[in-house]
Image (cartoon, rainbow, N blue to C red):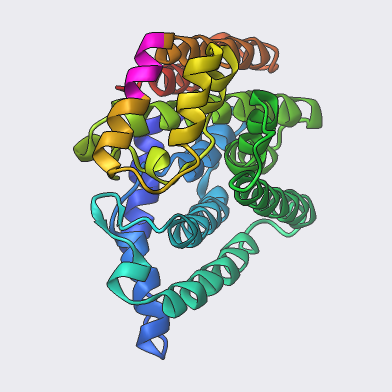
């Protein structure tokens, strides 16, 4: 089976030779820029890895894998505008480098290009691939809308949040694995098991991002630290803190996270102090571990030998051990 590093190398090489030279340049230059500034390439790499789990022939999986990467970057481009983010992967976001109108339209183009790449797969597999991709794309948008809705609601539970990140983040990772399995000729049962494995890993990934926003570093995370706190985002950490805090601490936290009047650095510091008092980092790591364990149990059920699945287990381990 192809390991994660090899799959990354394949995808990075393919992206390095992509250049959209159509006119008008203002529409396509941001697309080239977004694809050129790097990224972990997790989703397309998982397509390649899952395909190689069932077949030695992986060439036909490359274009669909690129489709997922292009689509993922399109969602980030629009996410950055909604979040007013100024950095992505330590580079200016598209709306900062150009403007918001260009960012909207270039993002739209990326979503269309994704379908063009997706269609370049064996014709007999195309209906299943299109159905999976289209349903996943809808779910990602649904998750993003829930995320926006949560900004103006004060009745969000931890379970509400977990459902939202399942849609916004986890289903695309799940679909990457299922798509690769389909392209590799896997049975429907095995493809569905890999989807479940990926969905749980996706939640692990997002909980890790939630922690990195608070406990990471800009150099490693690629974004300014504490932006979720400044933006009053209802992350797992915030919601869990509200859930377990006493009334006085809960009121302090609610006040901090419902106002833009605080100095940003002071706000980050005060919220982090509350997190540290309540052991929120450890609670989040424990919840992440639960999803990680479930992911591995699901992977064990896939009907290929354990040695072949070891590369996916190594990838899962890498996700949960990311530096916080």
Viewer-proximal residue among 145 and 115: 145
Residue sitting farthest toward the bottom: 24
Q: Looking at the image, which is closer to me, 86 or 178?
A: 86
Q: Is residue 228 visible?
A: yes
Magenta segment, prevailing SS (helix, strand or loop): helix
Residue 81 image point, x, y percent: 45, 62
Quadrant location of the C terminus in the rendered image: top left
Instruction: Indicate left or right for 123 with 209 as reference.
Output: right
Residue 155, by quadrant, is top right
**Residue furthest left as drawn:** 219
The magenta region covers 272-277
Residue at position x 41%, y 48% in the image: 260
Q: Is residue 102 left or right of residue 297?
A: left
Q: Residue at x 77, y 30 (%)?
A: 187
Eyeballing the image, is 25 above or below 7?
Answer: below
Query: Which corner quadrant of the image does residue 56 belong to?
Result: top right
- Judge left or right: residue 56 versus residue 171: left
**Residue 39 rendering spot, x and y as whole percentages:** 34, 47
């Amino acid at each position: 089976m192809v390991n994660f590093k090899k799959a990354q190398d394949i995808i990075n090489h393919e992206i390095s030779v992509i250049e959209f030279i159509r006119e008008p340049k203002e529409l396509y230059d941001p697309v080239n820029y977004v694809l050129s500034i790097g990224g972990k390439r997790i989703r397309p790499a998982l397509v390649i890895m899952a395909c190689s789990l069932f077949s030695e022939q992986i060439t036909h999986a490359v274009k669909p894998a690129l489709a997922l990467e292009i689509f993922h970057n399109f969602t980030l481009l629009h996410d950055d505008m909604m979040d007013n983010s100024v950095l992505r992967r330590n580079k200016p976001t598209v709306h900062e480098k150009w403007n918001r109108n260009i960012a909207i339209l270039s993002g739209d183009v990326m979503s269309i290009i994704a379908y063009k790449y997706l269609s370049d797969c064996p014709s007999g597999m195309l209906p299943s691939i299109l159905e999976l991709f289209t349903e996943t794309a809808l779910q990602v948008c649904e998750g993003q809308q829930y995320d926006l809705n949560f900004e103006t609601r004060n009745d969000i539970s931890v379970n509400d949040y977990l459902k939202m990140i399942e849609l916004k983040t986890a289903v695309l990772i799940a679909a990457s694995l299922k798509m690769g399995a389909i392209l590799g000729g896997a049975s429907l049962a095995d493809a569905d098991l890999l989807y479940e494995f990926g969905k749980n890993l996706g939640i692990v990934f997002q909980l890790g991002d939630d922690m990195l926003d608070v406990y990471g570093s800009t150099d490693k995370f690629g974004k300014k630290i504490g932006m979720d706190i400044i933006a009053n985002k209802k992350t797992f950490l915030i919601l869990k803190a509200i859930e377990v805090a006493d009334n006085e601490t809960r009121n302090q936290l609610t006040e901090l996270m419902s106002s833009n009047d605080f100095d940003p650095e002071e706000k980050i510091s005060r919220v982090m102090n509350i997190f540290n008092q309540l052991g929120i980092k450890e609670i989040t790591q424990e919840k992440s571990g639960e999803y990680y364990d479930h992911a591995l149990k699901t992977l064990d059920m896939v009907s290929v030998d354990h040695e072949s699945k070891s590369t996916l287990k190594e990838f899962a381990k890498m996700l949960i051990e990311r530096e916080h």
